[in-house]
Image: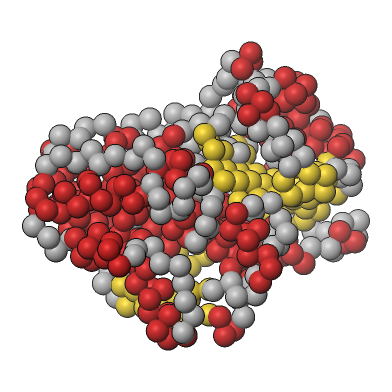
């Protein structure tokens, strides 16, 4: 969460663009992101140059000898008129070739244009972006979140960036492997995909492949962090870089940011596409990816809004006939998964207990035709200050059937549940991840299955008997502590004694007058 001086710096930068004649919020975000990307390219180049000196391991250079002047640390020291000329005429054209001709990323960047016309605005923007702590991946994600919150349309369709620590927990619980094909059908800024990539790098890095570096955090303090090389990926490296991560979204601005986000994290050729995955045109454009295509899907699809049924893929409507996007996306995700594939989906609580025919139809499909492994109830403040909606995470394996479902009541996520979302001591997430991985279904029908605790099992029979209701409050048992009170006669005697004392005190006061 961005607070304090860092938030103030972003606000100032936003104002600079507006006063500089760029009033369209989408354009502002794009231009800021382009400049952030230009700086990150140089930061990554400097990091790789340093690593090459230390280890002797060569790397593919982003800038040749004739392009050293267009690196961030070089052009930022130029006079503002020259700076604008370099960025407009050389830096932006480089964006179109940085990932190679014919790649998905270069396709997104081919229309990238520098909309900054005033040298003074370019100078101010470069100066402010140079102060942002982009070395820290967590902060970088928060920067994107805060930038996107500036959009006046943010949240209308239920689009909220998922907090990074929630994404990380979901990724750890699904535990992706090098052979997986991972997708997000409503990827936004590609938060799920980038975290999954980071997780794989950590998972497949030897102790010798970990490099410790130092960065300055938003408070100005030095902070050490690890860089994971992924040296154990070996023969899987090409698959990870080119065929593992797939994202779709119908917001072009989001996609451009998503593509840059993945490239900045190290994914060589991110497979990101402009596409509404609920539309019938999805199957037409991407026949190999629209059904039984992925082994893992992580998603926080739009919660709100409804669609024109005529535009929705008929195959989805056969699973659940509705206009509600939150139901349609769950159905579509199940279609996109291979048999045996796993998914973690954030859904609004209404999906769990909604009484409409469509709600019950979808939940029945989840239980009867798939293995619903877990329902994790999230605190209602997780998405604040952007939304206060109550949500849960569904963990599903496609195919087979459900016999028991594991529930977890997450009360605290390490942050206050108000709009400020300040860090707090209480945090259930480490316990959630640990207990999910160690859960034992054999305990479901024993006395050790205590439904008064945060984690417990519920049988399929109980769920079916409750019209496939998946809300945790339906099954969690509350322990009522019996309160013991004195006998009424005892209480009455105590009151009379008290009254006598009061009357005696009043008489004493009267005698003093």
Along the horizontal axis of the image, is 79 left or right of 443? left
Picture residue at 57% right of the left edge, 29% below the top: 276
In the image, residue 310 sits, relative to residue 288, either above or below, namely above
The residue shown at (50%, 61%) is: 266
372, 376: nearer the viewer: 372
- Left-right relation of 370 to 49: right
In the image, is 154 to the left or to the right of 276?
left
Q: Is residue 154 visible?
A: yes
Left or right: 323 as drawn, with respect to 110: right
Q: Quadrant of the C terminus?
A: bottom left
Residue 117 is drawn in which quadrant?
A: top left
User: In the rendering, at what x and y percent does residue 80 appear?
Assistant: 10, 53
Q: Position of residue 441 (x, y in %)?
A: 86, 59
Residue at x 90% of width, y 61% of height: 442
Which quarter of the rendering shows the N terminus?
bottom left
> Which of 352/215 is in front?
215
Q: Is residue 447 above or below residue 160?
A: below
Residue 74 or residue 331, whichever sits in front: 74
Total residue callouts: 0
Q: Quarter of the image holding residue 500?
A: bottom left
Q: Is residue 108 above or below residue 213?
A: above
Where residue 100 appears, as percent x and y from the top left, is 46, 52
Question: Which x, y percent locates residue 86?
Answer: 19, 52
């Amino acid at each position: 969460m961005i607070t304090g001086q860092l938030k103030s710096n972003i606000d100032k930068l936003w104002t600079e663009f507006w006063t500089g004649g760029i009033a369209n919020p989408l354009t502002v975000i794009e231009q800021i992101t382009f400049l952030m990307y230009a700086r990150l390219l140089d930061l990554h180049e400097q990091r790789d140059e340093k690593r090459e000196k230390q280890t002797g391991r060569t790397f593919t250079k982003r800038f040749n000898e004739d392009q050293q002047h267009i690196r961030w640390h070089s052009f930022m020291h130029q006079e503002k008129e020259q700076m604008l000329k370099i960025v407009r005429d050389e830096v932006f054209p480089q964006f179109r070739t940085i990932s190679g001709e014919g790649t998905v990323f270069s396709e997104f960047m081919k229309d990238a244009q520098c909309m900054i016309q005033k040298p003074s605005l370019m100078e101010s923007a470069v100066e402010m972006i140079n102060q942002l702590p982009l070395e820290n991946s967590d902060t970088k994600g928060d920067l994107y979140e805060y930038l996107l919150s500036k959009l006046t349309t943010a949240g209308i369709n239920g689009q909220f960036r998922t907090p990074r620590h929630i994404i990380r927990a979901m990724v750890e619980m699904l535990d992706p492997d090098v052979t997986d094909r991972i997708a997000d059908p409503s990827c936004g800024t590609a938060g799920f995909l980038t975290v999954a990539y980071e997780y794989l790098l950590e998972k497949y890095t030897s102790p010798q492949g970990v490099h410790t570096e130092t960065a300055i955090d938003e408070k100005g303090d030095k902070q050490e962090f690890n860089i994971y090389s992924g040296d154990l990926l070996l023969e899987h490296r090409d698959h990870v870089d080119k065929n593992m991560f797939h994202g779709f979204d119908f917001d072009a601005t989001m996609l451009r940011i998503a593509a840059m986000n993945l490239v900045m994290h190290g994914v060589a050729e991110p497979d990101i596409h402009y596409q509404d995955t609920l539309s019938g045109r999805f199957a037409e454009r991407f026949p190999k990816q629209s059904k039984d295509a992925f082994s893992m899907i992580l998603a926080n699809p739009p919660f709100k809004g409804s669609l024109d049924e005529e535009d929705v893929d008929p195959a989805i409507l056969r699973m659940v006939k509705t206009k509600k996007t939150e139901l349609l996306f769950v159905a579509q995700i199940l279609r996109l998964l291979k048999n045996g594939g796993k998914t973690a989906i954030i859904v609004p609580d209404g999906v769990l207990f909604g009484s409409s025919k469509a709600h019950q139809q979808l939940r029945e499909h989840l239980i009867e035709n798939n293995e619903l492994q877990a329902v994790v109830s999230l605190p209602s403040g997780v998405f604040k200050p952007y939304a206060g909606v109550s949500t849960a995470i569904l963990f599903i394996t496609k195919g087979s059937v459900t016999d028991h479902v594991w529930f977890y009541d997450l009360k605290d996520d390490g942050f206050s549940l108000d709009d400020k979302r300040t860090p707090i001591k209480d945090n259930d997430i480490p316990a959630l991840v640990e207990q999910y991985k160690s859960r034992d279904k054999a305990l479901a029908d024993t006395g050790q299955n205590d439904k008064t605790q945060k984690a417990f099992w519920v049988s399929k029979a109980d769920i079916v008997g409750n019209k496939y209701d998946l809300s945790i409050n339906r099954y969690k048992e509350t322990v009522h502590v019996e309160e013991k009170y004195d006998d009424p006669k005892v209480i009455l005697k105590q009151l009379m004694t008290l009254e006598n004392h009061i009357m005696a005190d009043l008489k004493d006061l009267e005698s003093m007058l």
